[in-house]
Image (cartoon, grey):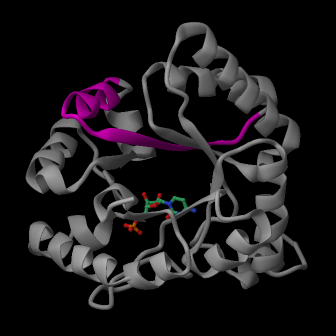
Amino acid sequence: MPWKDRLIIALDVDTADAALSVVERLGDDITTYKVGFELFVSAGPSVVQRIREQGKRVFLDLKYHDIPNTVAKAAVAAARIGVFMFNVHASGGFDMMQRTVSAVNELCVREGLSRPRIIAVTMLTSMTNDVLKNELTISHPVKAHVRTLAALAQKAGLDGVVASPQETAMIKELCGKEFLVVTPGIRPSWTPPDDQRRTATPQEALRDGADYIVMGRAILKADDPVKALELVSLEMLSA
Ligand code: C5P
């Protein structure tokens, strides 16, 4: 896969116009954009359509986490608006994930749609062992929890997981190289970690086997986003 198709830019902005102006500014180098809560709730599903009209793919990052029936129906809605990829929380459980996959498969066969990749969030990259232990009273460490959730997602028929760069190699070893790993929490050496806790550079993430990397602030908040993108592309190519 060329580097362009592996880099997903997070459109963490609050209007469709702001999103479209990023898409225009970054031009041909970027093929895939992530639409998350802020943009989707502010601008609505039509923003997905507008980004697609620019010839771009959309990763809908709404991290569904609800009862199986509700998530399966929301997943069908995502497939209908033509997203390339969307995600659910693995901690929603096996039944929730399995019903989501079968509802989407059925829809896509019935209506001749291309089937989006369905991936699961294991643990948010902002979480730490301390948060797990002291706030959620989960006694095993992040890595063990990620392993359990990745294996569960694979068993339920999902295409892959979202995971921190530091867990990529472990997941590939556990689930095989075909199982997709999408990694946010990417910080080139010249940017601060912000609220992310388990970060890696683009080069490290790809070397560890990530299929896709997600970058937001390191590009969008750079003084010159186009220049930042160029530097990131060089890092990615050197991996
Ligand atoms: O600005 P930054 O590069 O940290 O943005 C990362 C993006 O990836 C954000 O949109 C965030 O919501 C998303 N994300 C994440 N951790 C996950 C899943 C998604 O940071 N586990």
Looking at the rendered structure, the number of numbered marks drawn on it comes to: 0
- Split into 4 quadrants, where in the image is the C terminus? bottom left
Question: Percent from the top left, x then y, of residue 167?
Answer: 66, 77
Question: Percent from the top left, x then y, of residue 19?
Answer: 22, 44
Which residue is drawn at the image coordinates 76% and 63% (left, top)?
175
Q: Quadrant of residue 45?
A: top left
- Split into 4 quadrants, where in the image is the N terminus? bottom left
Q: Determine if the magenta segment contains residue 18.
A: no
Q: Residue furthest top?
A: 110
Magenta-colored span: 46-66
Q: Looking at this view, is 203 or 78 the one in front?
A: 203
Which residue is drawn at the image coordinates 72% and 30% (left, top)?
100
Q: Quadrant of residue 56?
A: top left
Question: Percent from the top left, x then y, of residue 102?
Answer: 75, 25
Above or below, 206 relative to 111: below
Residue 201 seen in this snapshot: no
Q: Determine if the magenta segment contains residue 59.
A: yes
Above or below, 137 relative to 200: above
Which residue is drawn at the image coordinates 65% and 24% (left, top)?
104
Residue 15 seen in this snapshot: yes
Question: Percent from the top left, x then y, of residue 5?
Answer: 34, 55
Q: Is residue 153 left or right of residue 125?
A: right
Q: Is residue 1 left or right of residue 43?
A: right
Q: Is residue 23 left or right of residue 175?
A: left
Q: Is residue 141 left or right of residue 36?
A: right
Which residue is drawn at the image coordinates 27% and 48% (left, top)?
31
